[in-house]
């Protein structure tokens, strides 16, 4: 027995047979003065609804593909964080590979200046006062997306002039220490307020946990500023 005929089943069938309306449409008769062609009007409405349905479907497919690609990128980046066997390896990964995984221009690890710091300077790692790090987030906020701010140069250093949008991801380092992962991109639409943040929050949680495992802590009083690459 055939299924019940519904509006949804009709639209689904028409979606699979988009040319049927043109085949069924009768030849246009000569229009008489004062006569309105309701059939033509209804068919035009149905065509418009079908076109909109197709456009909505295509947009949904495209969005789903983009979400899957972003999820894959973050998962691969997270595996890179987990594979790091030391703080040096983790810092190297953030400075040299993380931006490639996530398709952004810059990635910088910013740590509380009270964190134990090696004698040498390490590229892509910056020591900053805890107050400056915490100022990037509203109370309870873990991810802050948007355009550059006045103090962005403190985080991105020489790369600031390239960047048009930024993502600040809070890192809970334990022992009342602050930290964040700063990412920047030349495209002003890459990081915009209102974008979903679940994936980057997940990356930040894993990175924070790995830092707690790899990085001992102290209470050194002085803050270091931008650590530029060794020549």
Image (spheres, grey):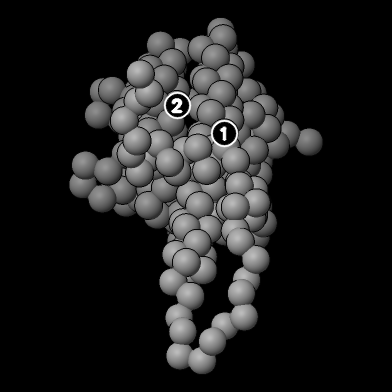
Looking at the picture, does residue 63 appear above or below residue 35? Answer: above
Q: Do the numbered discs 2 and 1 sit on residues whose CB atoms are within 8 Å?
A: no
Rendered residue at 64%/55% (across/down): 22
Residue 65: give x, y in percent of width and height: 57, 33
Residue highlighted by disc 1:
65
Q: Earlier in the sequence, mark 2 or mark 1?
A: 1
The kind of secondary structure element at disc 2 is helix
Residue highlighted by disc 2:
203
The kind of secondary structure element at disc 1 is helix
Tell me the distance, in whole angstroms, between the alpha carbons under discs 2 and 1: 20 Å
Which residue ends up furthest to the bottom in the rendered image?
A: 33
Camera-side residue: 163 or 51? 51
Could you classify mark 1 by the number of other residues whose Cα lies within 10 Å: few (under 14), some (14-19), or many (20 or more)?
A: few
Rendered residue at 52%/43% (across/down): 14
Rendered residue at 61%/74% (across/down): 29
Task: Specify the quadrant that holds the N terminus.
Answer: top left
Task: Answer whether residue 96 is visible to the viewer in this image.
Answer: yes
Could you classify mark 2 by the number of other residues whose Cα lies within 10 Å: few (under 14), some (14-19), or many (20 or more)?
A: some
Q: How many marks?
A: 2
Looking at the picture, does residue 112 appear above or below residue 91? Answer: below
Residue 91: give x, y in percent of width and height: 58, 24
Left or right: residue 40 compared with residue 120: left
Camera-side residue: 188 or 181? 188
Looking at the picture, does residue 110 appear above or below residue 81? Answer: below
Which residue ends up furthest to the right in the rendered image?
A: 231
Left or right: residue 160 compared with residue 11: right
Residue 63: give x, y in percent of width and height: 52, 41
Which quadrant of the figure has residue 17?
top right
The mark found on residue 82 in the picture is: none
Residue 107: give x, y in percent of width and height: 58, 38
Q: Nearer the viewer, mark 2 or mark 1?
A: 1
Looking at the picture, does residue 76 appear above or below residue 50? Answer: above
């Amino acid at each position: 027995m055939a299924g019940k005929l519904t509006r949804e089943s009709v639209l689904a069938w028409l979606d699979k047979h988009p040319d049927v309306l043109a085949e069924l449409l009768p030849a246009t008769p000569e229009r008489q003065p004062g006569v309105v062609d309701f059939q033509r009007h209804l068919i035009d409405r149905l065509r418009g609804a079908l076109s909109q349905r197709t456009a909505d479907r295509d947009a949904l497919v495209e969005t789903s593909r983009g979400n899957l690609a972003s999820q894959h990128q973050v998962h691969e980046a997270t595996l890179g964080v987990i594979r790091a066997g030391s703080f040096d390896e983790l810092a190297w990964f953030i400075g040299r590979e993380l931006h490639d995984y996530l398709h952004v221009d810059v990635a910088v690890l910013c740590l509380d200046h009270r964190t134990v710091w090696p004698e040498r300077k390490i590229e892509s790692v910056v020591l900053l006062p805890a107050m400056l790090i915490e100022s990037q987030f509203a109370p309870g906020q873990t991810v802050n997306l948007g355009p550059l701010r006045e103090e962005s140069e403190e985080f991105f250093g020489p790369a600031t002039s390239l960047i048009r949008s930024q993502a600040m991801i809070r890192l809970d380092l334990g022992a009342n220490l602050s930290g964040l992962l700063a990412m920047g991109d030349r495209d002003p639409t890459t990081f915009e307020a209102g974008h979903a943040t679940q994936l980057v929050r997940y990356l930040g949680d894993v990175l924070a946990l790995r830092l707690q495992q790899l990085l001992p802590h102290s209470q050194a009083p002085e803050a270091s500023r931008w650590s530029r690459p060794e020549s």
